[in-house]
Structure formats: structure tokens, C-alpha cells
Image: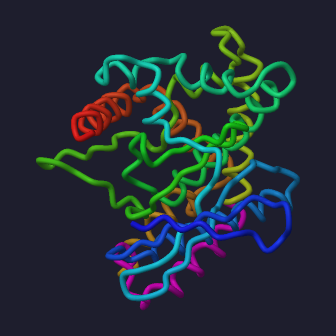
Amino acid sequence: PLWLVYNNKVFGEDSVGVIFKNGDDLRQDMLTLQMLRLMDLLWKEAGLDLRMLPYGCLATGDRSGLIEVVSTSETIADIQLNSSNVAAAAAFNKDALLNWLKEYNSGDDLDRAIEEFTLSCAGYCVASYVLGIGDRHSDNIMVKKTGQLFHIDFGHILGNFKSKFGIKRERVPFILTYDFIHVIQQGKTGNTEKFGRFRQCCEDAYLILRRHGNLFITLFALMLTAGLPELTSVKDIQYLKDSLALGKSEEEALKQFKQKFDEALRESWTTKVNWMAHTVRKDYRS
């Protein structure tokens, strides 16, 4: 990858950072980011702003393209690694993320940052579940200093999760770890009001997308002949139908999502184990 920085045409504005990538097919990333923009639009039309951050991405050739750099942001992996002297323990430090936000925010700014984190976390939980986004290690989830959480790198979608020795690396419907909940609850374990609001945001967001389920099915069906690596047959689109529970009533669909939400939280320890292995490898290579 090549990091490029352009001067902004607007005087006084920040420069624009772009990553040029060669050797990667970015069309699938483009499609996923377009779906995230559509979700953001549908949520806003329904009065729900989940502070999504679908950054720019443009495929310029068969295996080359440009990706927008999101300034003042760091990966979860770096945030955790910088908070611990032992790489193996970094992923299990539930205070690392909240302490990192406190470094750059205080008072009302910290409250706003936690609100940004809460809303964006809800948005990406629902979006990643519906689209079946895989390979969610701690270098593929980032947070801005203002609190906005966002996902990057969409090489695996529609439930095409990585596996090793026949075992799926990701065993949760979406990423929701206890350090995320720790931020949402403002560092207070018993803050059920904040957690309840977060959960309600997730449920509302899911139902809004489900009401537009046929739109998503149609858009993905139109891309079947594009030759994307993980959108090649009707079977891939079936994942969307299942995640949106289009064959069920709204009440049944909501019950299914609630079960997935509980599963994501209950099994989040598996995510932490994966993140630990990723962090140790990253620290060893550096």
C-alpha cells in the first residue's frame, strides 16, 4: 500500500489522505460500503442517526484502487496494545478503550464521545450481522478520537467466514465485547439504562432494515454477474434472506435478532481469544 496526502482545495481545511492499494480487488469493499451508506440513509429517514462512517473507496482497476484515510482514528488492536506491557493480555483489558477516549475527551466532550460510540457501535453491530461481514479481528475495527466506531476491510461478506482446520474462526453473529459495553455504560457496571438504550437502538435499526429487505435482495441480485469473489450464486443471497428473517413475521424476526444479540454477548469471549492471537502475532512481527 502507498499512503498519499493531497492538499485540500478548500483553504484552511485539513489535507486529504488516501491509501493506494495494488493487488487487492476492492469492488467487494465498494459494494459493502455502498450498502452501509444505504443503511445509513434508511435509518436517518426513519429518524435514527447511528453515526455511521462509510469512508470512500474506489476500485481503479482489476486489482488496484484508492481508500480514504479516516483521520484521528486508531484500530482497537493498537489501542489495546498501547495500554498493556504484555501483548497476550492486551485484548482482555476492558478499561483500555474507555481510558483511550478519556485521554482525548473530558467533561461534556467525553459524554459526547461515549454517545458517538454507543450509536455507531449499534449501527455496525446490526450492519455486520445483516451483511454477514467476517474477519472482524481487532485491526479491522477502528475508533475515532471523537468516539465514532467503524469497521474496515470487507474481504469476507454474506457469511463467508474464515476457518482453520475446519473450525470457523468467528463464532458470534456480530462483534459485541464487554469492553464495548464498558464504554457504553460509562464505566459503570450497573448502568442498565445506557445498555438498555443501546440494545433498543440495535433492535430498532434491525427492524428498519428488515422493512426494506426486498431492496437489499434486489441490489445484491443485480451484482451476481459482476464476478465478485463472495457473491457468485443465489446461495450467497440466501444469507441476507436468513439474517433479515424475511420468511417470518416481524415479531418472530425480532425474537430471532434478540437471540443473536444475546449470543453475541454471551460468546464474546471467543472474540477476545481471536483478538489475543491476532495481537500476539502482530506484536511478534513488529
The question of residue 229 being in magenta is answered with yes
Using residue 119 as the reference point, say whether residue 132 is left or right of it: left
| Residue 122, above or below 153 | above
Q: Position of residue 205 (x, y in %)?
A: 71, 49
Q: Is residue 233 visible?
A: no
Q: With 238 as the anchor, is 212 left or right in this view?
A: right
- The prevailing secondary structure element of the residues shown in magenta is helix
Q: Residue furthest left?
A: 165
**Chain part drawn in magenta:** 210-231
Name the residue at 83% across, 28% down: 109
In the depicted structure, whether residue 220 falls above or below residue 280: below
Residue at position x 85%, y 61% from top? 12
Tell me, yes or no, whether the highlighted magenta stretch contains residue 189.
no
Horizontal and vertical percent position of residue 163? 22, 51
Residue 150, image x, y percentages:
60, 48
* Viewport quadrant of the C terminus: top left
- Which is more toward the observer, 172 or 114? 114
x then y, percent, for residue 231: 40, 76
For the N terminus, the image quarter is bottom left
In the displayed image of the protein, which residue is found farthest to the bottom?
A: 225
